[in-house]
Amino acid sequence: MGDSLEILKQLPENSVDMVFADPPYGLAKKRGLGWKYSKHITLHEAWDIFTRDEFFKFNLEWISESMRVLRQGGSIWVCGSFHNIYQIGFILQHLDAKINNSIVWFKPNAQPNITRRMFTESTEHLIWAVKNHSKTKWTFNYDAMRALNDGKQMRNMWEIPLTPKSEKWAGEHPTQKPFELLKRIILASTNEGDTVLDPFLGSGTTSVVAEYYGRNSIGIEKNSEYLPIIRKRMSVNQAKIDRGESEVVYMYPE
Ligand SMILES: C[S@@+](CC[C@H](N)C(=O)[O-])C[C@H]1O[C@@H](n2cnc3c(N)ncnc32)[C@H](O)[C@@H]1O
């Protein structure tokens, strides 16, 4: 529990095999009048409000520190929307990361656009980049991905529905990611026993999936109101692992 800008600095360099980050998208300020009438939105998304300069400085800082902690040849995955993903890509290239793919996550059940003045946003974007690829090979579990895709090569367009209610049993987090999304990423870029770092753990999805598939995880989250959700999800997950259940589709309470 804490601020990743502080905690990342305390982690040794080259010490984790993969970073997954689902950082603040810098979206909340766009809600304008919504805050005036909804305390709920202000309260829950205060972590997403930045000025333009603050946002760039913040992104540069956490990405630089994450790259330092990542091992040579390790993968960094960042999830975002058009609001932040171009800036993230620019910073990764500036730091000499090699971008291997950008993945389009298509959400077939995304919410409709009520303004009718633009296309309905129904995608998020993921960048997969690697540190110092020329010195050490990166991990890509090609066969595991093909097996998840009915024996065909997996493409960079992933159709995954919004996080189902059945995965949100442990409490409310506004941007909880689906188990399936993290499953693909972690199984693609790590092996059993590897360590995955998430600087913006939220409701704990990265650690739940990593530990479910026999990886170690380090998660940082600064908002203590999400801690009970993380704890509940991790303990149910551990119970499933202890029982040797081979596949989790959705996380139900016991
Ligand atoms: C987009 S959400 C991550 C959601 C997560 N992937 C999940 O599946 O639940 C971003 C999270 O980062 C946290 N956060 C924002 N700034 C932070 C910081 N400087 N250090 C640590 N956590 C931070 C927020 O509280 C929020 O829970």
Image: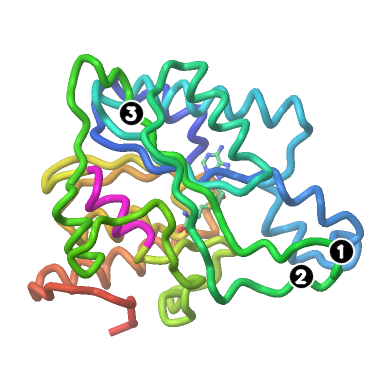
**Residue 59 left/right relative to 126:** right
Quote the CA–CA distance across marks 3 and 2. Answer: 35 Å
Q: Residue 20, percent across and down?
A: 39, 43
Q: Identify the secondary structure beneath mark 1.
A: loop
Question: Which quadrant of the figure has residue 157?
Answer: bottom left
Q: Residue 92, percent across and down?
A: 48, 25
Residue 130 is tagged as 3
- Say above or below: 189 vs 58: below
Residue 187 painted magenta: yes
Residue 113 is tagged as 2
Residue at the spot x=22%, y=62% of the render?
Answer: 152
Does label 3 or label 2 sit earlier along the sequence?
2
Quote the CA–CA distance across marks 1 and 3. Answer: 38 Å
| Tag 1–tag 3 contact (CB < 8 Å) | no
Residue at the spot x=20%, y=66% of the render?
Answer: 238
| Tag 2–tag 1 contact (CB < 8 Å) | yes
Segment tinted magenta in the rendering: 181-189
Q: Identify the secondary structure beneath mark 3.
A: strand
User: Crowdedness of circle 2 by 10 Å Cα count: few (<14), some, many (20+)?
Assistant: few
Residue at the spot x=50%, y=63% of the render?
Answer: 176
Question: Which quadrant of the figure has residue 204?
Answer: bottom left
- Say above or below: 131 vs 170: above
Dot 2 amino acid type: Asn
Residue 117 is tagged as 1
Residue at the spot x=28%, y=42% of the render?
Answer: 196
